[in-house]
Image (tube, rainbow, N blue to C red):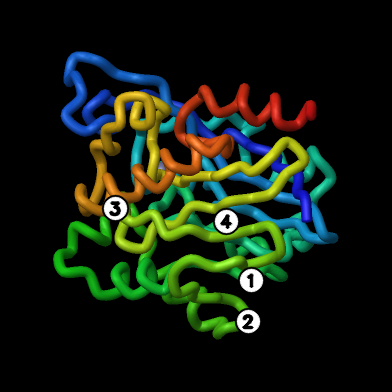
């Protein structure tokens, strides 16, 4: 099955390089964006991550700007998608900029996250691991049972042509998503890669919960890239050009 991917930018800001690249230059900062993705094919509308509203984002940071026309629901409606049209949502990880309360608007969607992400988030070894996460939202969604929340245990072909790949390190149960498209295979990396510099320099992101796992995940994604898979790094503005190119094929 071949799918079509559309990316939506929901915010922008800048980050000190060491946050994006482990032990990077503290004098430098780099432009960042926040994004989510619509995947369409096989009579299905699927989201990868959900973005956030301006109001929700303010609860966590002042460092991200969202323009009025960058609201996620507004952007989806501009391509003809209403919130009830979303069938499935794959969450790469549960940080607020990927998993926010807007997810509750998608009442018909089944939500897919890694079991390890769910369990670690609810029972962390230290409270720091719950920062940047709406733990109550996660608990609320779990109340919907299996038909609302699917906990994935490791790598799996979730739908024909859509595979989830565990890429822990940024968070304990982080996952990336490999998708077949007409322009070849494409991997949406979540925050396992924060900037294309991670791949170019072969250095992990600076913001992570486990550096060793982060490096292992980076190796996994580099291997995909070496095989010709298009790597889509959601926080790097450079990904927009790559996505556009894929759409013209
Ligand atoms: Zn993020």
Identify the secondary structure beneath mark 2. Answer: loop
State the image coordinates of residue 70 (x, y, percent, origin top left). 62, 34
Identify the secondary structure beneath mark 4. Answer: helix
**Residue at the image position 29 percent from the left and 37 percent from the top:** 205
Which quarter of the rendered picture does the C terminus lie within?
top right
Residue 138 in sight from this viewpoint: no
**Residue ID for mark 2:** 147
Residue count near mark 1 (Cα–Cα under 10 Å), binned few <14, some 14–19, many ≥20: some
**Residue at the image position 31 percent from the left and 68 percent from the top:** 121
**Residue ID for mark 1:** 110
- Which label was assigned to residue 163? none
Relative to 36, does residue 156 appear above or below in the rendering?
A: below
Q: In the picture, residue 75 is in which quadrant?
A: top right
First reached walking from the N terminus: tag 2 or tag 4: 4
Q: Are marks 1 and 2 in contact (CB under 8 Å)?
A: yes
Residue count near mark 4 (Cα–Cα under 10 Å), binned few <14, some 14–19, many ≥20: some
Q: Mark 3 or mark 1: which is in front?
A: 3
Identify the secondary structure beneath mark 3. Answer: loop
């Amino acid at each position: 099955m071949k799918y079509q991917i559309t990316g939506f930018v929901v915010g922008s800001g800048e980050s000190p390089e060491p946050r994006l690249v482990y032990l990077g230059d503290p004098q430098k900062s780099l432009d960042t964006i926040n994004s989510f993705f619509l995947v369409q094919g096989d009579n299905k509308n699927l989201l990868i991550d959900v973005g956030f509203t301006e109001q929700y984002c303010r609860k966590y940071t002042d460092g991200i700007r969202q323009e009025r026309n960058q609201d996620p629901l507004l952007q989806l409606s501009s391509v003809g998608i209403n919130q009830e049209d979303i069938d499935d949502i794959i969450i790469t990880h549960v940080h607020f900029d990927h998993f926010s309360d807007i997810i509750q608007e998608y009442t018909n969607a089944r939500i897919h996250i890694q079991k390890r992400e769910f369990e670690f988030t609810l029972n962390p070894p230290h409270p720091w691991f719950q920062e940047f996460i709406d733990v109550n939202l996660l608990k609320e969604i779990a109340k919907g049972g299996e038909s609302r929340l699917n906990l994935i245990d490791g790598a799996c072909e979730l739908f024909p042509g859509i595979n989830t790949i565990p890429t822990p390190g940024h968070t304990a149960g982080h996952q990336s998503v490999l998708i077949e498209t007409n322009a070849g295979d494409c991997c949406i990396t979540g925050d396992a890669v924060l900037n294309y510099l991670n791949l170019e320099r072969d250095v992990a992101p600076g913001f992570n919960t486990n550096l060793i796992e982060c490096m292992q995940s980076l190796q996994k994604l580099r291997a995909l890239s070496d095989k010709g898979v298009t790597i889509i790094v959601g926080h790097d503005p450079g990904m927009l050009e790559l996505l556009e190119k894929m759409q013209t094929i």
